[in-house]
Image (tube, rainbow, N blue to C red):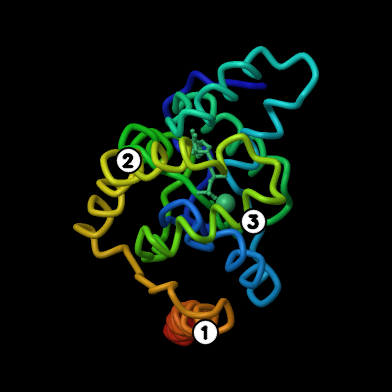
């Protein structure tokens, strides 16, 4: 794993980074897969990257990552950010959905300062009771060390105390698009898709207007 020491953004304005946030089990991964198909994003799940690094032979962080995940705690920012930055650098795309990140203020600030500024946050709003039901169901087949009732309770506490403040931080900058996800995945996606379509249409329009002024 490569760490970098220069405190400067690696990826500039030509990159579109959307943070996809929401409690555990809200459905972030499912909706990201839909967005990849329709809008040509590359989907990077911070949790998946951590799990991959945990399995990687020779990784010095395997045990540490496993313990944090089981306890529902946030792995030190340095590790997760390095994994995300390396994945972005390897990809030919300039459009990224960053799923399940940032979920702690230090991660948010460090990533924005040293890797790339996020365009906005897509926030999936979901009551705990619904998330609990989904996670317990997923736990039957996921094989994840954190899809059990003890870990789930800890993840809910971390979400409320540590991750939600990140959503509030971006809300103050008017950068949060909220979607309720108690409905079926299809309905949730219809709402999500409309948000992305509006944004990209507006961007396209602005680009055309700018080039018309130039010519
Ligand atoms: N995690 C972390 N930092 C991150 C993202 C995830 O430490 O930036 C850890 C954390 O312990 C979390 C776990 O990975 O509880 C699982 O995250 P994932 O996004 O896979 O869970 P989901 O929210 O999708 O259920
Ligand atoms: Mg997920």
- Is residue 197 positioned above or below 158 on the image? below
Q: Indicate which disc, 2 or 1, sits on the residue closer to the N terminus.
A: 2
Residue placed at 68% from the left, 26% from the top?
Answer: 54
- Is residue 112 positioned above or below 66 on the image? below
Q: Which residue is mark 3?
A: 43
Q: Position of residue 133 (x, y in %)?
A: 49, 60
Q: Which residue is mark 1?
A: 187
Front residue (pair 139, 21) = 139
Q: Indicate which disc, 2 or 3, sits on the residue closer to the N terminus.
A: 3
Residue 120 visible in the displayed image? no
Residue placed at 50% from the left, 56% from the top?
Answer: 25
Q: Nearer the viewer, mark 3 or mark 1?
A: 1
- Is residue 213 positioned above or below 18 on the image? below
Q: Which residue is mark 2?
A: 157
Q: Position of residue 103 (x, y in %)?
A: 39, 42
Front residue (pair 32, 180) = 180
Q: CA distance from mark 3 to mark 1?
A: 21 Å
* Secondary structure category for the residue under label 1: helix
Q: Residues within 10 Å of mark 1 (few under 14, many from 20)?
A: few
* Secondary structure category for the residue under label 2: helix
Front residue (pair 23, 6) = 23
- Is residue 139 positioned above or below 121 on the image? above
Residue placed at 47% from the left, 79% from the top?
Answer: 183
Q: Is residue 190 left or right of residue 155?
A: right
């Amino acid at each position: 794993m490569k760490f970098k020491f220069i405190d400067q953004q690696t990826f500039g304005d030509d990159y579109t980074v959307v943070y996809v946030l929401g409690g555990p089990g809200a459905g972030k991964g499912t909706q990201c897969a839909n967005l990849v198909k329709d809008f040509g994003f590359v989907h990077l799940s911070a949790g998946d990257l951590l799990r991959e690094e945990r399995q990687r032979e020779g990784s010095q962080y395997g045990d540490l990552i496993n313990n944090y995940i089981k306890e529902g705690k946030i792995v030190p920012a340095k590790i997760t950010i390095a994994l995300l930055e390396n994945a972005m650098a390897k990809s030919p795309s300039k459009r990224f959905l960053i799923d399940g990140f940032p979920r702690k203020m230090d991660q948010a600030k460090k990533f924005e300062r040293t890797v790339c500024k996020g365009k906005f946050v897509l926030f999936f709003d979901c009551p705990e009771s619904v998330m609990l039901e989904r996670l317990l169901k997923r736990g039957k087949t996921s094989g994840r060390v954190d899809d059990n009732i003890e870990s789930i309770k800890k993840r809910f506490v971390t979400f409320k105390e540590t991750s939600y403040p990140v959503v509030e931080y971006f809300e103050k900058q008017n950068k949060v698009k909220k979607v309720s996800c108690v409905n079926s995945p299809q309905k949730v996606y219809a709402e999500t898709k409309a948000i992305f379509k509006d944004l990209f249409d507006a961007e396209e329009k602005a680009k055309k207007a700018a080039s018309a002024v130039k010519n």
